[in-house]
Amino acid sequence: MEKTMNIKSKLLLALLATSSAAFAQTAPAAPESAIAYNVGLVSEYRYRGIAQTKGDPALQGGVDYTDASGFYLGAWGSTIKWIKDSAHSSTSAQTKGPVELDLYGGYKFEAAGIAYDVGYLRYQYVGNTLNQNTTDKLVNANTDEVYGAATYGVTTLKYSYAFSDLFGNPNSKGSVYWDLSATYDLGDGYSLVPHAGHQTVKNNTNGYTDIALTLNKDFGEGLVGTVSAISTNGKGKSALASYLTSYDTAKSTVVVGVKYSF
């Protein structure tokens, strides 16, 4: 496991990215109670369009419990690099947080031919010390969101609302992300997923839009491969680069991944 800040908080946009090739973190619907596990590898972890691993691969995995009633719980994790890279050289030894752990729960139901999904998602950056980056006046990276989604046919619209500060950005409670996607079955195990999202950050003008096009291939026996083309209208390297590496976290890229579910 992702995975938009004020001008000073250059790398923190690295948390606000589309991870179309990094796999969905919301528990799948199931007709009966079940527990499912997954492990995966991506060439780069992107979340809401922005790089989380500085262009390097990420190891990911999770577990989901789905109840026949529609309730679900889950946990998903990924390696990351953006927190370490968010510090200036004078504070880099203090700023750490190599793992993202997402904890979520919600309820899925259907009414009038529309499938709904409402829930809560906690982004826990294990042991992170982002608030020790006093140069940029950052706060703890841990973030809490509630979300609601509606699916009609192949199209899903999702709304996420942060009721905590967003990924280390101070005074950002109330930030919002809109996500519009569709899933087209191409047959023979292939599916195509176009996506568009828009992130706004409370008390900040550095909102942005991300787009992605993902081709999935189900090889059977729980194995799925993905190829995603991802782009954003972020402001470029000067505003979105890591302090330590100058890596452009918002540049367009292609991400490949593989996931095994069991």
Image: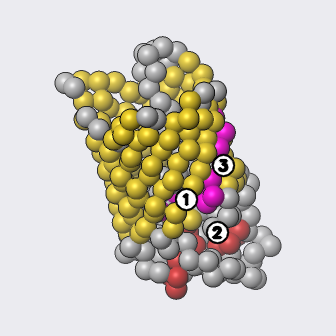
In the picture, the quarter occupied by the C terminus is: top right
Please name the residue shown 75% across and 75% down the image. Answer: 92
Q: Nearer the viewer, mark 2 or mark 3?
A: 3
Numbered disc 3: secondary structure: strand
Q: Is residue 72 above or below residue 151?
A: above
> Magenta span has 48?
yes
Q: Determine which of the numbered discs, if any, sits on residue 255 in the image.
A: 1
The picture places residue 41, in percent across and down from the top left corner, at 66, 49
Q: Residues within 10 Å of mark 3 (few under 14, many from 20)?
A: many
State which quadrant residue 79 falls in. bottom right
Q: Residues within 10 Å of mark 2 (few under 14, many from 20)?
A: many
Give the distance between the C-alpha atoms of the residues marked 1 and 3, in whole angstroms: 11 Å
Residue segment shown in magenta: 38-49
> Magenta span has 14?
no
The amino acid sitting under disc 1 is Val
Q: Is residue 235 above or below residue 157?
A: below
The amino acid sitting under disc 2 is Lys
Q: Determine which of the numbered discs, if any, sits on residue 41 in the image.
A: 3
Give the distance between the C-alpha atoms of the residues marked 2 and 3, in whole angstroms: 15 Å
Q: Earlier in the sequence, mark 2 or mark 3?
A: 3
Visible residue check, residue 201: no
Whether the residues at callouts 2 and 3 have beta carbons within 8 Å, the answer is: no
Q: Earlier in the sequence, mark 1 or mark 2?
A: 2
The amino acid sitting under disc 3 is Leu
Give the distance between the C-alpha atoms of the residues marked 1 and 2, in whole angstroms: 13 Å
